[in-house]
Each structure stands twice: as C-alpha cells, then as structure tokens.
Image: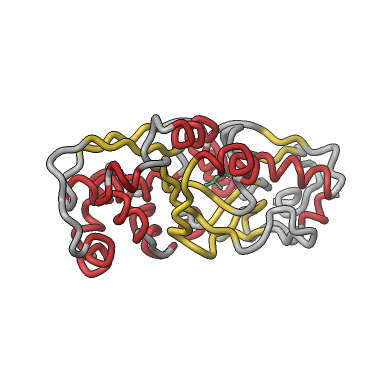
Amino acid sequence: ASAANGLSGMKHEIIGIDPGAGIMKATEQAISDYELEDWKLIEGSGAAMTAMLDKAIKAEDPIIITGWTPHWMFAKYDLKYLEDPQKTYGEAEEIHTIVRQGLKDDHPTAYEFLDRFEWTSDEMGEIMTAIQEGSDPAEAAKTWVDAHPERVDEWVKDLSPVDGDTFKLSYVAWDSEIASTNVLEYVLESKLGYDVTSLQVEAGPMWTGVASGDVDASAAAWLPLTHADYWAEFGEKLEDLGPNMTGVKTGLVVPAYMEINSIEDLK
Ligand code: PBE
C-alpha cells in the first residue's frame, strides 16, 4: 500500500452525503478556509458514503469522508477526525428537539415527553450498531426501549396517555437520526398512545415542515453550527426544546492508517 497512506496518487475528492446536510455546507466552507481549491466535495448519501468507506478500508486505500459522531462507523473501523485548527466544523455541537408552534396546547403529553427526552451517544450507539448488523430499525428501537425501562421512565413518568391521536415526526436518513426517530416513534406509540407517522425527508423540508406546522416535531436539529442556516431561516417559526444529546461532532474523517492528521495536510 505505497500510495495508500498519504495523499500522493489519490483523487482529490472528499466523499460527502446528501446535499442538504449541514456537514456539506461546513465542508465547502473548509475547502475555502483551508484553501483546498483543488479538492472536490462529492454529493451522495450516508449509505453510499459508508459503502465507499468499507470498500476503501478493505483495500487499505486512502479515503476522506464527511463524518460525524455518534455513528456506528467509529465502532466498526479504526478512524480518526482530521484536526480542524480553524474550527470550521465548530465546537460543542448538540442535537436539539424542535417542535411546531402550538404543540404544547394541542398535544401536552407528547410535548412534555419530547421536552424531557435526552440520552447519550453510547445509548444511541447500541441501536445504530444493531441496525448496522441487520436489525430492522423499528425492531432495534423496540429492543432498546424494552431493555432500558429506567431510562424510558424518566421520559414518560406520570404522563397521561392519549387515545390514538395522530402525530407526525420528520427526520433525514442519517444513521443517527434513524435511531433517534425510531425510539421516539416507539415510545410515543407504545407508552403514550399516539398513532405516529415518521416522514423521511431532506434536511430543508425537515425544518420547513416543523416551521409551517405540517409536522409536529423532529429530533434531528444539529446546533449551533451544523444547521445554523436552517435555524436562521426557521428558528423564529418553531419552538426549540433544547438538546436531546450533547457532545456530538462533525468533521472530516479518515482511516487511522492514513498518514495525515489535520485538514491543513490536504493543502
Ligand atoms: N449529519 C448528521 C447531519 C446532522 C446529523 C452530521 C450528517 C448534517 O450534517 O446536517
């Protein structure tokens, strides 16, 4: 693997995901901040990106991807974030739960549950790994919820269940958000009596849906940086229930066998 560990002979491509993802905007910003004009950010999807990562690692080829934590790929492969001395990918990122205006009056039980909902990246990681190993997402969420009654009780204790009220969640098909949304759906249905529809959409429509009131809630708002543009556009038109997870991160990620350590090394 002569060319494998450095950058020589490597196509100057960063393997990205869906164009609406905040990490794509941050990566365009990184290309500008670090003067990487000869690098190209490739659009795709989370699934295509992890498929390419798997293939590269099996061949010990060099690869640079847009990555984030929590994600099962860090458990499966030996990976590292490239240092980001300019902090283009921000610091102290969090995942927030956002809800439509008026939700508190219309669905007080769901509102209170969503307001209490918070968990850790390790907890989410258990579900992500189960899904990656072949479990159906709804089944993986159910298994996790059933195995963690004390945690779930913190979220639903003393709330009055409803009788089949309909409720709409929206999310993007990022692995982290597939896990969280399936947990919310299962708890809302099995513990609180709602009839839930989870709409899989692009990032823009996810924010627009909650802002317009077409969707009740989403647990997939990455703030303050990753979704800063969406927040600037829609923040006033919805309610932010605060973080459901802290200490999350985004950046450029490479296999540990690569000899570069910083985004600056791409120049
Ligand atoms: N992500 C995962 C999303 C937020 C969740 C980092 C890919 C994004 O970049 O918008």
- 74 sits left or right of 138 in the view: right
Q: Position of residue 177 (x, y in %)?
A: 43, 46
Q: Where is residue 26 drawn, in percent x and y?
A: 69, 45
Front one among 13 and 29: 29
**Residue beneath the point at 41% across and 65% down:** 120
Whether 233 is drawn above or below 68: the answer is above
Where residue 115 appears, x then y in whole percent? 37, 57
Looking at the rendering, which quadrant does residue 233 occupy? top right
Nearer to me, 169 or 19: 169
Give the colour scheme shown.
secondary structure
Task: Note whether 217 is above or below 253 in the view shown.
Answer: above
Relative side of 37 to 111, left or right:
right
Left of 109 or right of it: where is 231? right
Residue at 38% x, 52% y is 128
Residue 230, quarter of picture: top right
Q: Quadrant of ligand 1?
A: top right
Which residue is farthest bottom? 150
- Residue, x 33% and y 48% (percent of image)? 104
Q: Residue at x 71, y 44 (%)?
A: 27
The single residue placed furthest to the left in the displayed view is 163
In front: 50, or 212? 212
The image shows a total of numbered marks equal to 0
Q: Where is 12 relative to 243, above or below?
A: above
* Horizontal and vertical percent position of residue 153: 22, 65
Q: Is residue 202 left or right of residue 12?
A: left
